[in-house]
Image (cartoon, grey):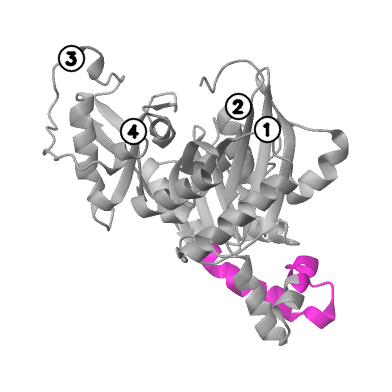
């Protein structure tokens, strides 16, 4: 099937988060994307920490109910692995044939992946001078005749030759530089197989499997010429991603999310988790109510590791790429925390704003207030659906 034909075609983005599942169905109209339907269901969907058959079945059934309730009308799906579950790095290798480059990438991967390479799926792409990616990825192989068997094959490795090789027709990787700049990612095979099995069980056509940071970059970044940082504050983790030329090139995660803030408020005020969650959403970092003075203090204390991580990534990017981050884009369920934008703008001394996940999508004007409110939660799902459109 030609996924990139000009005829009208619908695509479904499925974001399996740690505490909820979000879906977005988009239709292609010409070169633009139009919203067809969307939905969210709260469910314990933390596949990383709970891989039991019961948990997987629970997620599959929840996704099935959500698809039915949202009246999804396509089986073409795209989903993403959590950023914190994937290892990612930008490496440089001399020009060589594609076969030698494949072997060289595997050897380089062993330097930063703390697990056996045979237990991982490697995905690498050459970064062209214009920032575009050159090469196949996981989604290309999901649709081939052998499916995942290509990734699970146990072919014998040979130590790569790093010296320049003579050109061999189309097998030689051509770039302007003498070195290839490569975006390398690695994901656990057992995790990938779980995702594939969930969609297979529901009879869905999983045409694309990527990393959350790619999906968020696709939906949130409007000007690819700028260097931006996306800070996605989820319920359990916060992902920090630096994008350059529209590509996520530096990713880090910390186990501090919205739930940690809520638990801190509940402890400081000696109240239930649900009531603390309401306090968090109502007051955030404001001091407008004397009865909840401890709420901003509790949130600020939990934000400290996040702020330190952001500053560390600022410095790391400056040292490695000699670059400067132009702005910080907030995403995730806690992005709308009252006064969070002002607080981070002040402590980071940079431009901070909440990302608009829908700015590349056409939808009825009357839906704008609702979509603006839920937008930060749907940045991954929108980006996944856009994968089939763009």
CB within 8 Å, label 2 to label 1:
yes
Closer to the camera: disc 3 or disc 4?
4
Which residue bears the numbered disc 4? 146
Q: Quadrant of residue 355?
A: top right
Q: Outermost residue, right direction?
A: 366
Q: Residue at x 54, y 46 (%)?
A: 229
Q: Which residues are magenta?
A: 278-306
**Mark with earlier residue (1, 3):** 1
> How far is disc 2 from disc 1 in space, using C-alphas?
8 Å
**Mark with earlier residue (1, 4):** 1
Q: Quadrant of residue 204?
A: top right
Identify whether 380 is placed above or below 239. Answer: above
**Marking on residue 26:** 1
Identify whether 269 is placed above or below 76. Answer: below
Position in image of residue 292 (x %, y %): 79, 79
Determine if the magenta segment contains residue 280. yes
Identify whether 189 is placed above or below 295. Answer: above
Identify whether 285 is placed above or below 57. Answer: below
Q: Residues within 10 Å of mark 2 (few under 14, many from 20)?
A: many
**Element at badge 4?**
loop
Q: Quadrant of residue 122?
A: top left
Closer to the camera: disc 3 or disc 2?
2
**Mark with earlier residue (3, 2):** 3
**Marking on residue 389:** 2
CB within 8 Å, label 1 to label 3:
no
Q: Residue at x 72, y 85 (%)?
A: 269
Magenta stretch: dominant secondary structure: helix
Position in image of residue 108 (x %, y %): 22, 44
**Quarter holding the C terminus?**
top right
């Amino acid at each position: 099937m030609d996924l990139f034909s000009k005829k009208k075609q619908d695509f479904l983005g499925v974001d399996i988060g740690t505490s909820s599942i979000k879906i977005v169905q988009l239709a292609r109209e010409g070169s633009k994307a139009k919203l067809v339907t969307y939905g969210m269901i709260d469910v314990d969907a933390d596949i990383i920490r709970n891989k039991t058959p019961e948990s997987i079945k629970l997620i599959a059934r929840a996704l099935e109910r959500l698809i039915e309730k949202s009246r999804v009308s396509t089986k073409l799906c795209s989903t993403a692995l959590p950023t914190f579950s994937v290892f990612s790095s930008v490496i440089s290798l001399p020009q060589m044939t594609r076969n030698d480059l494949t072997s060289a990438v595997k050897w380089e991967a062993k330097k930063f992946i703390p697990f056996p390479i045979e237990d991982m799926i490697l995905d690498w792409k050459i970064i062209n001078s214009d920032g575009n990616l050159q090469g196949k990825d996981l989604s290309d192989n999901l649709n081939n005749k052998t499916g995942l068997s290509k990734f699970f094959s146990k072919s014998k490795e040979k130590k790569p030759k790093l010296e320049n090789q003579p050109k061999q027709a189309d097998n030689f990787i051509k770039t302007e530089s003498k070195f290839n700049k490569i975006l390398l990612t690695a994901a656990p095979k057992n995790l990938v197989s779980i995702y594939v099995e969930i969609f297979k069980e529901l009879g869905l056509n999983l045409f694309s499997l990527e990393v959350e940071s790619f999906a968020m970059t696709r939906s949130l970044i409007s000007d690819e010429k700028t260097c931006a940082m996306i800070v996605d504050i989820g319920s359990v983790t916060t992902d920090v991603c630096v994008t350059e030329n529209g590509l996520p090139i530096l990713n880090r995660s910390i186990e501090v999310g919205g739930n940690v803030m809520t638990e801190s408020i509940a402890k400081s005020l000696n109240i239930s988790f649900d009531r603390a969650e309401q306090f968090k959403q109502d007051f955030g970092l404001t001091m407008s109510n004397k009865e909840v003075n401890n709420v901003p203090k509790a949130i600020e204390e939990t934000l400290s590791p996040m702020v330190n991580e952001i500053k560390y990534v600022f410095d790391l990017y400056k040292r490695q790429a000699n670059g400067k981050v132009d702005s910080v884009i907030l995403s995730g369920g806690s992005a709308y925390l009252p006064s969070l934008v002002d607080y981070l703008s002040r402590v980071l001394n940079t431009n901070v704003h909440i990302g608009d996940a829908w700015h590349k999508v056409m939808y009825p004007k009357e839906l704008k207030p609702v979509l603006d409110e839920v937008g930060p939660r749907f940045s991954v799902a929108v980006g996944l659906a856009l994968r089939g459109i763009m």
